Image (cartoon, rainbow, N blue to C red):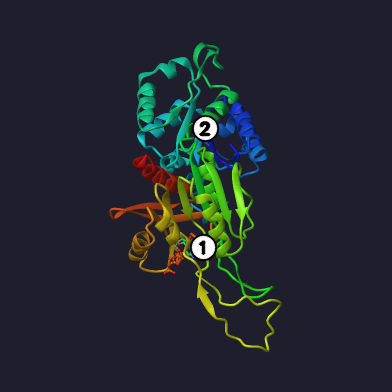
Amino acid sequence: MKGKKIVLCVSGGIAAYKACILASSLVKAGAEVRVAMTENAAKFVTPLTFETLTKNAVVTDSFSRETPYEVTHISMAKFADLVIVAPATANIIGKAANGIADDFVSTLLMAVKCPVMFAPAMNTAMYENEAFQENMAKLKKRGAHFIEPGTGLLACGDIGKGRMSEPEEILSYIRKYFLDKQELTGLKVVVTAGPTRERIDDVRFISNRSTGKMGYEIARAAADRGADVVLVSGPVSLECPENVRRINIESAADMLEAVLSQFDDADIIIKAAAVADYKTAEKRDGKIKKSGDMSLELIRTQDILALLGERKNKQVLVGFAAEMENLRSNAEGKLIRKNADMICANDVSRSDIGFGSDENAITLFLRGERQIEIEKCSKYAAANRILDEAFKIYRERH
Ligand code: CTP
């Protein structure tokens, strides 16, 4: 569960105390956890408990002035890979089912696009109530997960169904959910990331602003989905994601060599690297003095993506395009010219996404003049959407 971004919504029931254990277990399992609470939940357990356990601020109030410039329910919704509502009262389930957004948690539930899980907790009669059952059925139909409550002695003294699942059961449900998304098992995915460096002399080089974040998130997402991942990386300051084999390179020529060595048995190749288009014509040793000739002769580097496009047989080939203008025509041009199966186009003139940012908005250009918009979201979520489409192309061919 390492690195998974989980939003835990706590609504007002006595089982809120079990949500503390759940938050702690999720953190111990390596997840990044943020907690949202209803006002009633905060009467059972204080936000401070969750803040201490998760090391993140807890949100209860939609109109809090603590982060006045951030629309918190939207930023939290975009942050999440998964939302879990535990305990989920009849009230919050009723609101979610019927599109009511009158407090922070219900507003957040309306804004999320990632999967949502509910762990109901209530009295047996409430659980069996027709209105509740209809609400639960509605949410299940829309894709929500329900972690069935257990049967036993309830806080009200009744014996019956309605006791929230134990934190370990909820944790294993979440673990299984992430494991089930392993459809890339058995596939080899090669990802390139980061900038390249083209030497000018022994102390200087030509490079670019790429931080490698997008490529690293693609590698991480592919590994999370079970693929055998090789990450060919330019110089960046990022940690290698878990279960990913990294090959470190410097120049475009190194990257070409590394990618070719991995190409024959690769199933999907995603070229997120910002490869330098030019290198110096001549290799200069030592340090060029400022008193000398000030001009540098540049020559083109090999276009790796285009070369792979010529050589590919069954491999799915995905390229990136960083554009300042004419996004569509430039990206479609690259798709055809480089014989790729998909181009992920970034508008690098936008300062809120792209280079160095944790978020991205991408347009995917596919064969047959198809276009898919990935609205601004975390780079991990964007990575998963890119992988969804690359995997669809892979399946069409096999
Ligand atoms: N690319 C590559 N080898 C290069 C240059 C680029 O493999 N020498 C790949 C990048 O990894 C990316 C795609 O080509 O997947 C697009 O790169 P980009 O720099 O946006 O486009 P260019 O083809 O260089 O075209 P232009 O400079 O006209 O934008």
The residue shown at (60%, 24%) is 168
Counting from the top left corner in percent of width and height, residue 173 is at 52, 27
Kindly state the secondary structure of the residue where label 2 is placed. Answer: helix
Q: Amino acid at mark 1?
A: Ala
Would residue 208 be visible to someone looking at this image? yes
Q: Given the current orientation, which residue lies at the most extreme left position?
A: 368
- Circle 1 crowding by C-alpha within 10 Å: few under 14, some 14–19, many from 20: many
Q: Given the current orientation, which residue lies at the most extreme top position?
A: 159
Q: Is residue 364 above or below residue 280?
A: above
Mark 2 vs mark 1, CA separation in Å: 32 Å
In depth, the one of 135 and 236 nearer the eye is 236
Q: Which residue is mark 1?
A: 274
**Which image quarter is the N terminus in?**
top right
Q: Amino acid at mark 2?
A: Leu
Counting the numbered discs, the total is 2
Q: Is mark 1 within 8 Å of ligand 1?
A: yes
Q: Is residue 110 above or below residue 177?
A: below
In depth, the one of 270 and 308 nearer the eye is 308
Q: Which mark is residue 147?
A: none
Q: Earlier in the sequence, mark 2 or mark 1?
A: 2
Q: Which mark is residue 179?
A: 2
Counting from the top left corner in percent of width and height, residue 236 is at 62, 59
Would residue 218 be visible to someone looking at this image? no
Query: In the rendered image, which quarter is residue 140 located in?
Result: top left
Counting from the top left corner in percent of width and height, residue 197 is at 60, 67
